[in-house]
Amino acid sequence: MPQEIERQYKEIMRQYVMRQTEQNLYAGQNFSRQLIQKNIAPEDVISIHKAALEEMQPELPVNVWHSFDLLIEMMIRYGLALKEHQSLLQRQEEMKLEMDLAANVQKTLLKTTVPTINGLEIGMISVPARQMNGDYIYFLSDNSEYAGVAVADVIGKGIPAALCMSMVKYGMDSLQDSHTDPAIVLDVINRIVEKSVDDDMFISMFYGRYNVTNSVFTYASAGHEPALFFDSATETFSELHAKGLLLGVVPNVTYNQHDITLKAGDLVVMMTDGVTECRTEEGFIEQDIILSLISSLRDKPAQVIVDTVYKELEKMQDFELRDDFTLVIYKKTDSNV
């Protein structure tokens, strides 16, 4: 222990005992900063205090001095625990900074552009439950005749899920032709994912392609949540089932594709399980509630529908998402002109 530190503390303590003014307290506060800068441990500060008190009040009972010995032992443990706590806080702060950076990189890297297609409205929303998004939307379109969309969901969270999504984007970027059949799209992405992603990471994906010329929506699925079709004529919903293995399981998979013709007012609703498995404290939100909500908004623009559905379901969950929320709606309008 530096003698100068001991000398300064004894003088500060002597002045405080004699006068007990705000100025004396301020001197002690400033001195504490000096102790921190010199990395003086709490137990050493108590030792200094004990030595100073012995000089000023040597007649104090022996039990008082024993109490200081107990306090010193306590402060040794306290100091160790405090350092460990501060180290943990520092690591958490570093991790938060890294996650913020990774989230920003993900937003930039996975950014996609919503197509502008005559006769078709497109609404989309994707909100991560945490910083990193395990869901992904990718549009593949020529802004003229075709509007394709991939909706993917990684079985996993955090940075590993984000890295998986970068492989999906890489694969989608390699597909230059917007008229490529959905079955072929899934086959290409599956081969890339199977080679590039760890064996314990799997991706579900739905791919749909709208043809402006004949108003046909063609779709295929790799183990993804079924899309929903809203028939405006009957005002009923039906599921667009399409069987297919998850991406990344095996290299050679045959995906089946299906067609459905859209009429004015029809909706195709594509989503991840963060929509269909919304939960409250009482349990899952019934699908009928979600379907009724979408149906009540059927006359609104597609983007208004997805935004409103998200806000209402978020409210039902007390504004606490338990899973990534991704919703895409294709709405057929009156004219292709």
Image: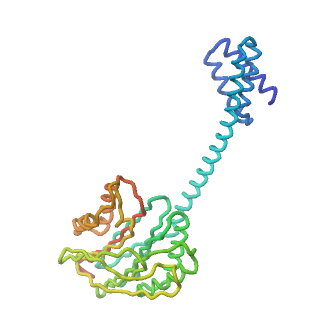
Quarter in which the C terminus is drawn: bottom left
- Tell whether 63 sits left or right of 120: right
Which corner quadrant holds the N terminus?
top right
Compared with residue 248, is residue 290 higher up or lower down, i.e. above or below? above
Q: Position of residue 232 (x, y in %)?
A: 20, 76
Residue at position x 55%, y 67% from top?
Answer: 160
Residue 273 occupies which quadrant of the picture?
Answer: bottom left
Q: Is residue 337 visible in the rendered structure shown here? A: no
Q: Nearer the viewer, residue 86 or 74?
A: 74
Identity of the residue furthest to the right in this view = 3
Asked if residue 1 lies left or right of residue 194, the reply is: right
> Where 138 sits versus 8, above or below?
below
Q: Residue at x 32, y 59 (%)?
A: 313
Q: Which of the 4 image quarters holds residue 25?
A: top right
Residue 202: x %, y % from top left: 50, 74
Q: Is residue 288 left or right of residue 134?
A: left
Q: Nearer the viewer, residue 15 or 120?
A: 15
Quarter of the image where one finds residue 20: top right
